[in-house]
Image (cartoon, rainbow, N blue to C red):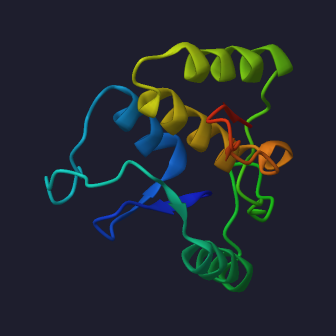
Amino acid sequence: MRDPVVLCTGQSYEWSIIEPWLEAGNHTCPATMQTLASLELVSNHTLRRLIQNWCEVHGGGDSSGALVRLLSTPSVPVAADTVARMLREVQSSVDPLPSLKNIRLVKKRSPSLRFLRWEQTDSGESSF
């Protein structure tokens, strides 16, 4: 396991495995079959460190024999035009909640976008 994440059920999964499961429209925990109250994936840094320590002690490695080097949570690069499109969807939508949830997920995975803040002016206009 290289990038462990936790679902709201407390179960840990490899990010590259659980992400496609959720994107395919599955809203249940594969282990418990509970309906997920949240689709948020939280990095399991403790498990990652335990795996890394175990690999260092036991010589765990990949097929080339190199010691497994666990990296920080991968960030997903996001193009400026993608962000602009997402913002337009929020502003033009009757129900902006789904678009806002998408922005939240992208923002979490892309450290360069973590500065985004939703603001509402006194005149009632909303912006990032």
**Horizontal placement of 84 versus 96: left or right?**
right
Q: Residue at x 69, y 54 (%)?
A: 62
Q: Residue furthest front?
A: 123
Q: How many marks on residues?
A: 0
The residue that appears at 41% across and 18% down in the rendered structure is 94
Q: Nearer the viewer, residue 111 or 47?
A: 111
x 77%, y 59%: residue? 71
Compared to 77, does 56 lie above or below?
below
- Location of residue 2 by image quarter: bottom right
Q: Is residue 40 above or below residue 8?
A: above
Quarter holding the N terminus is bottom right
Q: State left or right for residue 34 relative to residue 49.
A: left
Give coordinates of residue 105: x percent, y percent.
57, 42
Residue 74 lies, in percent from the top left, at: 73, 48
Q: Position of residue 118 (x, y in %)?
A: 67, 44
The x and y percentages for residue 34 are 14, 56
Q: Quadrant of residue 55?
A: bottom right
Q: In terms of image quadrants, where is residue 107?
A: top right
Residue nearer the viewer, 19 or 62: 19
The quarter of the image holding the C terminus is top right
Decide if residue 66 is on the left or right side of residue 15: right
Name the residue: 71% across, 42% down. 121
